[in-house]
Image (cartoon, rainbow, N blue to C red):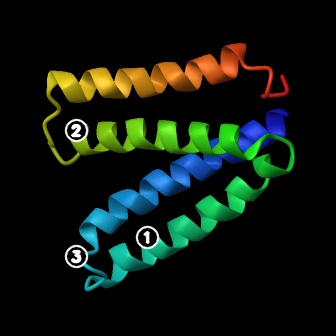
C-alpha cells in the first residue's frame, strides 16, 4: 500500500507541475511551458494508474483531485501572488478535511 501512496503522491506532484505550466503556456503558444504541461500530465496519469490497481477509483480520484486543488491554490498564492479570500481558504480547508477523513476513517482505503 505504501508503494500505491508513493505513486499517488508522484501523480499529484506531476499534475501540479503540469497545471502550473499550463497557466504559463498561453494556449500552447509557448514551447517550453507547453512541453512541460504535456509531459507532466503524461507522468501524472501514468503514476495514477498504479494506485488504481489496489485502491478504489473514487478514493484515488478524491485524494488526487483534492490535494491537487489545494496544492495548485497554494502554488498560485505563493508563486503567482494570486489572492485567496476567506471563502476560498475555508473551501480549501474543507477539501483537505475531506481527504483526511477518507484516509483516516474510510474502510475503502486498505491501510
Q: Residues within 10 Å of mark 3 (few under 14, many from 20)?
A: few
Q: Residue at x 35, y 64 (%)?
A: 21
Which element type, helix, strand or loop, lies under badge 1?
helix
Are dots 2 and 3 in contact, CB under 8 Å?
no
Q: Which residue is drawn at 54% across and 56% down?
A: 14
Q: Which mark is residue 55?
A: none
- Label located before the other in sequence (3 or 1): 3
Horizontal and vertical percent position of residue 43: 62, 64
Q: In this view, does 18 lie above or below 73?
A: below
Which element type, helix, strand or loop, lies under badge 3?
loop
Q: How crowded is mark 2: few (under 14 residues within 10 Å), some or many (20 or more)?
A: few
- Label located before the other in sequence (1 or 2): 1
Q: How many marks?
A: 3
Q: Residue at x 79, y 53 (%)?
A: 50
Horizontal and vertical percent position of residue 25: 28, 74
Q: Residue 77 carries which label?
A: 2
* Residue labelled with disc 3: 26
Check the picture and name the quadrant holding the N terminus: top right
In this view of the protein, which residue sits in the foreground, 86 or 71? Answer: 86
* Residue labelled with disc 1: 37
Amino acid at each position: 500500500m505504501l508503494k500505491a501512496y508513493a505513486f499517488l503522491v508522484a501523480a499529484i506532484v506531476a499534475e501540479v507541475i503540469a497545471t502550473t505550466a499550463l497557466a504559463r503556456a498561453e494556449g500552447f503558444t509557448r514551447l517550453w511551458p507547453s512541453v512541460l504541461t504535456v509531459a507532466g500530465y503524461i507522468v501524472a496519469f501514468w503514476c495514477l494508474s498504479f494506485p488504481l490497481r489496489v485502491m478504489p477509483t473514487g478514493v484515488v480520484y478524491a485524494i488526487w483531485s483534492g490535494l491537487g486543488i489545494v496544492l495548485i491554490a497554494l502554488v498560485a498564492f505563493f508563486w503567482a501572488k494570486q489572492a485567496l479570500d476567506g471563502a476560498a481558504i475555508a473551501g480549501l480547508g474543507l477539501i483537505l478535511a475531506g481527504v483526511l477523513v477518507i484516509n483516516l476513517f474510510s474502510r475503502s482505503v486498505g491501510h
